[in-house]
Structure formats: C-alpha cells, structure tokens
Image: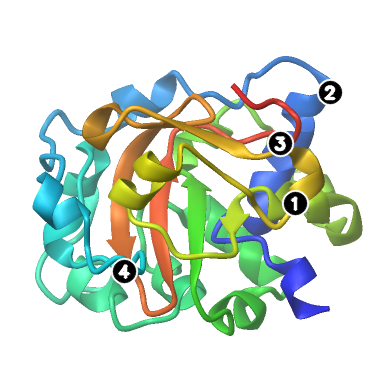
C-alpha cells in the first residue's frame, strides 16, 4: 500500500543511520551539525505567525532556525520561493541541507510516493547527521527498503503540522505506530523532536511541512 512506503524526505538515508543507531549508541545525534551551520539565524516565528491557518500549512514568514540561512535566496533552486509550490520530494531535491537524504530517496524510487501524499509532516535529518556513517554501510542499508520501512515511517506524520501545532499536540503518531509517538518539547527555537533540535523548521512545500533536524529518530526510543 502506498502509504506504508512513505518515508519522508529522509527515506532510505534516514533509515540507514537509524539502523546504525539501533545496533549501537545514539550516534545519529550529530554534534557536528551545529558547527556545520552558520552563526546567523532566522528568528523563531511569533505566536501569530506560528499558529498558521490551523491546518499545518506555513508561509516563508514562518520559517525559523539556525540552518535556514544556508538556503539559497530569491527564486534560486532550493530557496523557499522555489520549494514552496513543489511537492515535498521534488522540493527536497534542491535543498542544500538534505543532499544525502535525497540521494537515497531517488535510489529507492520513492520520489513519486512522497510527492503523491496529500498532507504530511516530515522530520528530516540534515546531512551532518550522517557524518559517522561510512559510504559502504550507507549504500548497503539503503538497498534494503523492506527492512528499512518501519524506520522510514517513523519520520513521517500522516497529518500536516506547523511548529505551533506540534507544540500544542505535545506528541504525534507517525506512520510507524508500533514505534510509539514522537515527543515534542519546548517551542520555537527551543523545540525538540524526540530530543532532536530543529535546524530549520516550518518549511512549506506543496504537500508537506518540513522540519530539518540534527539527528535521526529511532523507533521505540521516545525521549
């Protein structure tokens, strides 16, 4: 069933690192992510902006987080103006924060699956979260979509949330219900997703609201 294969922007790449985390420690949390991001930061949205329209949709004015400054400006590929009208996988393919994730999405032929979803929330680990994973292991795990599916599903929520909606919910169920709910703590720039920090949140795409985070979420390890 199409929905069962939905992984979010990070699909196979997310899963690959998650499996590594399951077999060892929580090394997916990237201490290097902060050093890889610029010091400038897009301010957290005000309460009025963050509340959006109540359906989880956001605008460029709602985007916040230290890594947002890395996005191209204007209408260049990967900019907010460019990504907004595109479905999530297509938008992600131009996002400079998610190059490793997008490579895995394409390798596992999940672009159309993601793009066809109606309204989802995606928690997408940024490239620095994969620093501890070697290329050989990455390629090996990315080639096993059936084994990766439950982990992939843990990064996608079957409902669209903005930051205010997530904070109000406190926890959200993902497509991998067996993995347990994802815990939301704090708000704005202090919000965490199962302990992962938001590097760039409230990113609008045609069918999803995206939160780039600094580590991979592992099913069954609710913080």
Residue drawn at the location 60% of the way across and 74% of the way down:
114
- Find the distance from the CA under tag 3 to the CA under tag 4: 28 Å
- Find the distance from the CA under tag 2 to the CA under tag 1: 19 Å
**Which residue is labeled 1 in the image?**
176
Which of disc 2 and disc 3 is earlier in sequence? 3
Q: Which mark is residue 153?
A: none
Classify residue 128 as left or right of residue 139: left
**Which residue is labeled 3 in the image?**
18
**Which residue is labeled 2 in the image?**
23
Q: Is residue 139 visible to the viewer in this orientation of the structure? A: no
Which of disc 4 and disc 1 is earlier in sequence? 4
Dot 4: few (<14), some (14–19), or many (≥20) neighbours within 10 Å?
A: many
Q: Quadrant of the N terminus?
A: bottom right
Q: Is residue 198 visible to the viewer in this orientation of the structure? A: yes
Q: Is the Cβ of the residue at disc 1 closer than 8 Å to that at disc 4?
A: no
| Element carrying mark 4 | loop
136 is higher (above) or lower (below) than 33 = below
- Find the distance from the CA under tag 2 to the CA under tag 4: 36 Å
């Amino acid at each position: 069933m199409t929905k069962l294969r939905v992984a979010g922007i990070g699909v196979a790449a997310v899963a690959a690192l998650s499996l590594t985390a399951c077999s060892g420690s929580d090394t997916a949390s990237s201490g290097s992510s902060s050093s890889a991001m610029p010091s400038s930061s897009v301010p957290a949205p005000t309460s009025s902006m963050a509340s959006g329209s109540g359906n989880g949709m956001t605008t460029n004015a709602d985007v916040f987080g230290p890594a947002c400054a890395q996005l191209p400006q204007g209408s260049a590929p990967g900019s907010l103006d460019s990504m907004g009208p595109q479905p999530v996988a297509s938008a992600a393919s131009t996002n400079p924060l998610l190059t490793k994730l997008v490579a895995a999405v394409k390798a596992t032929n999940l672009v159309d699956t993601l793009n066809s979803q109606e309204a989802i929330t995606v928690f997408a680990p940024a490239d620095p979260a994969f620093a501890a994973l070697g290329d050989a292991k990455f390629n090996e795990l990315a080639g096993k979509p059936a084994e990766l599916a439950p982990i992939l599903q843990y990064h996608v929520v079957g409902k669209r949330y903005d930051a205010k909606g997530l904070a109000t919910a406190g926890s959200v169920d993902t497509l991998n219900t067996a993995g347990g709910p994802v815990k939301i703590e704090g708000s704005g720039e202090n919000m965490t997703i199962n302990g992962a920090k938001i590097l760039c949140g409230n990113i609008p795409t045609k069918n999803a609201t995206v939160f780039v985070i600094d580590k991979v979420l592992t099913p069954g390890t609710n913080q």
